[in-house]
Amino acid sequence: MVIAWRRDMTGQAPRQGDPLIPRPSPTLPTLRQAVAAVAPGRLPEMFTKMQEAFDRAAKEGSVSPIHMFYREWAVIVGIERHPDVARRLHEGPFELLVHEDDTELTQLALHDDFAFDEELSGTTWMDAALRPSVERSEGFRLVDRSQRPGTPHPMIKRNGASIEARLNECSLYDPALDLAV
């Protein structure tokens, strides 16, 4: 792994507040409408990058640049629709771990103004107090193995009938952390 630093961004995971708009579907009309709502000053950039993506797609004979364009702007909207998140991300330096063999992510990082240092390791961590809240879906329940002893393990189809016995042989296995929906 190598570490890339982006200027003028912060490395702390921001808290998420209420979004300004609902999450849009990743289509051009909905993304354009979302950018106009949450970051109207970025519309010219969006149109420039869209044209670049379509030009690259035509040149390469591939739709991958178009898919990357949609992904990039879905992420931008995902951030900008939470003003507190966007504000904190624009405040100070931001650290990104990039595997040295990941040329695609390296190119994206360089394109977005990241500068690489010589550090070959790193840690990703989020303070528990900064973890975004998780919304539970109606009709589903999160349970752990300690709440359901004697029932078949949920991974039995994939890993065979002895999965629970094999897990129990591992000193790091904790049934209270073995979650299922």
Image (tube, rainbow, N blue to C red):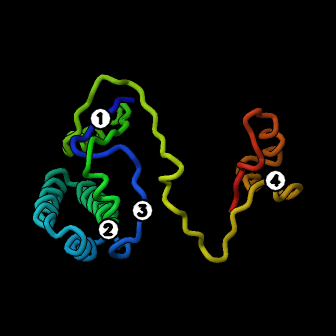
Report which quarter residue 32 is drawn in: bottom left
- Indicate the amino acid at tag 4: Ser
The mark that comes first in sequence, 3 or 1, is 1
- Indicate the amino acid at tag 3: Gln
Query: Label 2, on which residue?
Result: 81
Query: Spatial distance from mark 2 to mark 1, Cα to Cα?
Result: 25 Å
Does residue 24 show up? yes
Query: Label 1, on which residue?
Result: 4
The mark that comes first in sequence, 4 or 3, is 3
Query: Label 3, on which residue?
Result: 16
- The percent position of residue 147, horizontal first and vertical second, equals 81, 58
- Dot 2 alpha-carbon crowd within 10 angstroms: few under 14, some 14 to 19, many 20 or more: many
The mark that comes first in sequence, 4 or 2, is 2
The mark that comes first in sequence, 2 or 1, is 1
Query: Can you tell which mark lies on residue 146?
Result: 4
Query: Spatial distance from mark 4 to mark 2, Cα to Cα?
Result: 39 Å
